[in-house]
Image (tube, helix red, strand yellow):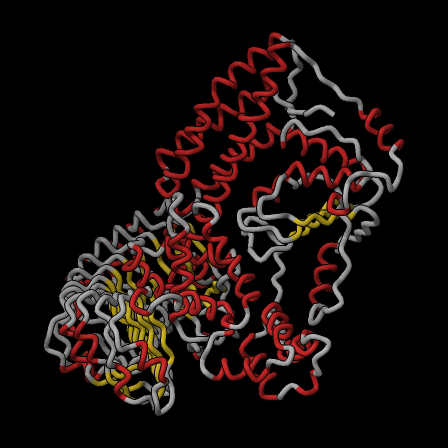
């Protein structure tokens, strides 16, 4: 069969329309400017082909058809660019997804013109018409003797049998089966199972499908487009008798474009993809959960080699291994098979704090493959083709955080801004996390209590990581001599320091990230370490009192401090005043800490850019607050229950751009002098339920573009000068049940684009909508039963 390119003069007009649109958007859509530059250049370079084909169509008197796959592709590209132009600058997730789609479309353009159009031009120029009869192929197929084909079993697409050892998949298999047969599909012999290798070849895959249906004497395809055209015709033919299911198994990262090529508009045709990676472009994703404890124990016991008597396994060993594998089937299987009479040795290694990977090279090799995938190709889309090596480093950094804890995306942003020079707004941080999530190396979850969730802000996201993957990150970070490691990650507990700790800390290390977790029993001399090159210091402790380590005074490159207490009440931290002596500090985050000791600090922290206080005892700190942070750009205060008022001195922080005070239930008012915060761009006051009003001086904040007052239940009025906020673009005000009117001046908010509110608040805006031409109301239905008022992060 000849390739049916369907390129005619009818394709010329859509091509030029697309070129015009891309050129215009490349100049105006700033968020996609660098991405659109590539397809614009590609289209311009292809224009000579277009003109020549147009001329040849006239010369050959070829009929014009308005309906063919190529025109549909061009129209798809046109719609794609249109959608990109409508995506808001705040919606990072959509920017990320549509950037990928633009790059996939550009890749298709290049492939089509470099192969298919060149072939067609050559044919047209020579006026050669090539047709291969379907009848000839059908005769060849019928004459083929069964069982005499030279092709091996790997050339077919048979569905493999289930392995003998299957645990915990009964429900998932039932649910997936329901998804692919929901419209009554009975596929009979029309199921094609194709294992997609890392370097998949499209033509080889198509050839397997043809051979599976008995077409053994196929000639080579002239191009990928030719192969796909022939496949589509075959599927339409066999699909007339029964639905079709194409299973693409073990698709690797970057396989989205390959999957897309097999998507045909054929009734009853479905594609089922299995992968360790997530492909955001496609819907109906089914994510397998980890094994529960009962299934994990069952799988582990069944995985132990047959000659070993599993009944003799010590109960404590089984529990230790199952707990360590965290329901990860591969880990349970590999450890079980490796056990075979060596349980005493393995248990001894684990009790010494050794990694599971020390004795399981198979497990390491398998998980290493997912990590190595980050090196396979340069990252595209939101990164503008930056090196994927940064994403790999970001994965390894996650091992610095405690197990089974949600990591706020903003914390990672603070680290990566300083370590890898990423952007301050968090776009690349979120894109990093999306890449890792797409490879199932992390779980990226939104916080449902965050009102900005629907708008894609980085602040509304958290990261969790499977215990085995965290251990992989730690294991990879701990390779090589300690003095050359980039990360130093230590978890200390008990009254005696382990020998390996004493031996390792006797020499200085050049680690950029140092993470140390301690409990209340650890002796004080744990802090006798030398880390002069540390840039990010993460201190986690499980005690009611804590002393900052003195080695911090010996660091002159420390930029980020993350201090977290994991006890029931705010921990008392002494020696906080030494922070005033670390001039390099730019970002501090404290969680569940009492700040009373910091109130006596008399030193200014002139280089501090960001201060985050989460669930802290804070009021005494503000009692004696002076201009301690003269160059502070961002302040974040969250779940600080004893915060009653903000100090007037806060308004002297004239460089402040972002002020976020959320879930502080006792905060009754904002300080006077707010007009002095002339650089403020973002103000979040969400869920400050006793806040009565906003100061009139807020009207002086001409740079304020984002204001969040959602769930300020007692807020009774908005300032009369509200309309003077000429730079305001986004306003969140859902759940402001005390408001029954808006000040008339809101009609002057000429830049206002989005108001996110409930139905009651939307009614208040109706009289002013005619005055606000750019305004879009985003009405969110309030869940009366939601438990947001009493929800705290775990």
Query: What x and y, as percent, mark residue 734?
Result: 42, 64
Residue 696 appears in the rendering: no
**Residue at x 56% of width, y 35% of height:** 76
**Residue at x 68% of width, y 74% of height:** 303
Q: Is residue 177 above or below residue 359?
A: above
Query: What x and y, as percent, mark residue 313?
Result: 65, 85
Front residue of 160/19: it is 160
Q: Which image quadrant for residue 136?
A: top right
In the shown orientation, is residue 601 left or right of residue 610? left
Is the C terminus in the top left, top right, bottom left or bottom right quadrant? bottom left
Q: Which image quadrant for residue 535?
A: bottom left
Residue furthest toward the top?
Answer: 59
Question: How many numbered dots are placed on residues in this image?
Answer: 0
**Residue at x 61% of width, y 43% of height:** 200
Q: Is residue 439 above or below residue 30?
A: below
Is the N terminus in the top left, top right, bottom left or bottom right quadrant? top right
Q: Is residue 643 above or below residue 140?
A: below
Front residue of 526/185: it is 526
Residue furthest toward the left?
Answer: 602
Residue 759 appears in the rendering: yes
Query: What x and y, as percent, mark residue 203?
Result: 66, 36
In the shown orientation, is residue 771 left or right of residue 647? right
Q: Is residue 147 above or below residue 393?
A: above
Front residue of 322/27: it is 322
**Residue at x 75% of width, y 33% of height:** 233
Query: What x and y, as percent, mark residue 128?
Result: 67, 12
Front residue of 381/747: it is 381
In the shown orientation, is residue 725 left or right of residue 304? left
Q: Which image quadrant for residue 99?
A: top left
């Amino acid at each position: 069969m000849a390739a049916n390119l369907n390129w005619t003069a009818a394709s010329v007009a859509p091509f030029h329309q697309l070129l015009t649109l891309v050129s215009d958007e490349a100049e105006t859509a700033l968020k996609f400017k660098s991405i659109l530059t590539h397809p614009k250049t590609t289209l311009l370079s292809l224009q000579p082909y277009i003109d020549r084909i147009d001329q040849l169509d006239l010369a050959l008197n070829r009929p014009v058809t308005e309906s063919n796959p190529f025109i549909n592709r061009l129209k798809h590209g046109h719609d794609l660019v249109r959608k990109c132009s409508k995506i808001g600058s705040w919606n990072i997730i959509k920017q990320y997804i549509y950037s990928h789609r633009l790059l996939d479309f550009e890749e298709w353009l290049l492939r089509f013109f470099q192969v298919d159009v060149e072939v067609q031009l050559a044919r047209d120029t020579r006026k050669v018409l090539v047709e291969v009869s379907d009848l000839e192929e059908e005769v060849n197929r019928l004459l083929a003797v069964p069982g005499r084909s030279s092709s091996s079993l790997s050339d077919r697409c048979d569905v493999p049998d289930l392995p003998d050892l299957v645990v915990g998949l009964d429900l998932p298999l039932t649910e997936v089966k329901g998804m692919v047969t929901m419209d009554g599909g009975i596929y009979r012999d029309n199921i094609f199972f194709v294992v997609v290798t890392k370097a998949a070849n499209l033509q080889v895959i198509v050839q397997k499908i043809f051979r599976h249906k008995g077409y053994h004497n196929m000639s080579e395809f002239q191009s990928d487009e030719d192969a796909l055209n022939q496949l589509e015709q075959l599927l339409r033919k066999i699909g007339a008798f029964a639905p079709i299911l194409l299973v693409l198994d073990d698709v690797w990262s970057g396989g989205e474009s390959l999957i897309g090529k097999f998507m045909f508009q054929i009734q009853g045709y479905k594609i089922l993809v299995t992968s360790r990676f997530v492909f955001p472009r496609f819907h109906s994703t089914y994510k397998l959960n980890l094994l529960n404890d009962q299934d994990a124990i069952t799988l582990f016991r069944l995985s132990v080699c047959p000659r070993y008597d599993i009944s003799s396994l010590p109960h404590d060993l089984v529990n230790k291994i199952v707990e360590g594998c965290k329901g990860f089937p591969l880990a349970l299987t590999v450890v079980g098979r490796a056990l075979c009479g060596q349980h005493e040795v393995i248990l001894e290694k684990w009790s010494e704090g050794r990694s599971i990977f020390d004795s399981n090279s198979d497990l390491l090799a398998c998980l290493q493959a997912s990590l190595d995938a980050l090196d396979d190709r340069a990252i595209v889309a939101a990164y503008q083709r930056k090196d994927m090596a940064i994403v790999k480093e970001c994965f390894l950094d996650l091992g610095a955080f405690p197990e089974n804890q949600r990591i706020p995306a903003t914390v990672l942003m603070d680290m990566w801004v300083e370590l890898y020079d990423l952007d301050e707004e968090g776009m690349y941080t979120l894109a990093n996390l999306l890449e890792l999530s797409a490879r199932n190396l992390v779980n990226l979850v939104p916080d449902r209590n965050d009102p900005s969730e629907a708008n894609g802000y980085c602040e509304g996201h958290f990261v969790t990581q499977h215990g085995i993957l965290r251990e992989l990150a730690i294991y990879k970070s701990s390779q090589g001599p300690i003095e050359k490691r980039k990360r130093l990650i230590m978890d200390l507990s008990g009254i005696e320091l382990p020998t390996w700790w004493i031996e390792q800390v006797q020499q200085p290390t050049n680690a950029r990230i140092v993470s140390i977790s301690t409990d209340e029993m650890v002796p004080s001399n744990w802090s006798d370490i030398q880390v002069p090159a540390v840039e990010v210091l993460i201190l986690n402790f499980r005690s009611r009192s804590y002393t900052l380590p003195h080695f911090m005074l010996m660091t002159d490159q420390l930029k980020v401090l993350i201090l977290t207490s994991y006890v029931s009440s705010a921990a008392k931290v002494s020696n906080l005043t030494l922070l005033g002596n670390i001039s390099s500090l730019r970002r501090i985050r404290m969680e569940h800490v009492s700040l009373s000791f910091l109130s006596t600090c008399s030193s200014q922290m002139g280089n501090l850019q960001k201060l985050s206080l989460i669930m802290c005892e804070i009021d005494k700190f503000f009692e004696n607050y002076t201009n301690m942070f003269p160059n502070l750009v961002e302040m974040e205060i969250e779940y600080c229950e004893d915060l009653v008022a903000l100090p007037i001195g806060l308004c002297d922080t004239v460089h402040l751009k972002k002020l976020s005070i959320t879930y502080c239930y006792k905060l009754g008012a904002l300080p006077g002098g707010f007009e002095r915060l002339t650089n403020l761009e973002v103000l979040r006051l969400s869920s400050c339920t006793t806040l009565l009003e906003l100061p009139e001086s807020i009207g002086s904040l001409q740079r304020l573009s984002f204001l969040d007052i959602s769930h300020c239940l007692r807020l009774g009025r908005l300032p009369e000068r509200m309309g003077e906020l000429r730079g305001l673009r986004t306003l969140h005000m859902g759940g402001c049940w005390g408001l029954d009117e808006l000040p008339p001046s809101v009609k002057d908010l000429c830049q206002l684009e989005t108001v996110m509110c409930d139905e009651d608040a939307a009614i208040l805006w109706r009289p002013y909508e005619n005055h606000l031409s750019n305004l879009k109301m985003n009405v969110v239905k309030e869940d009366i039963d939601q438990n947001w008022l009493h929800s705290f992060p775990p």
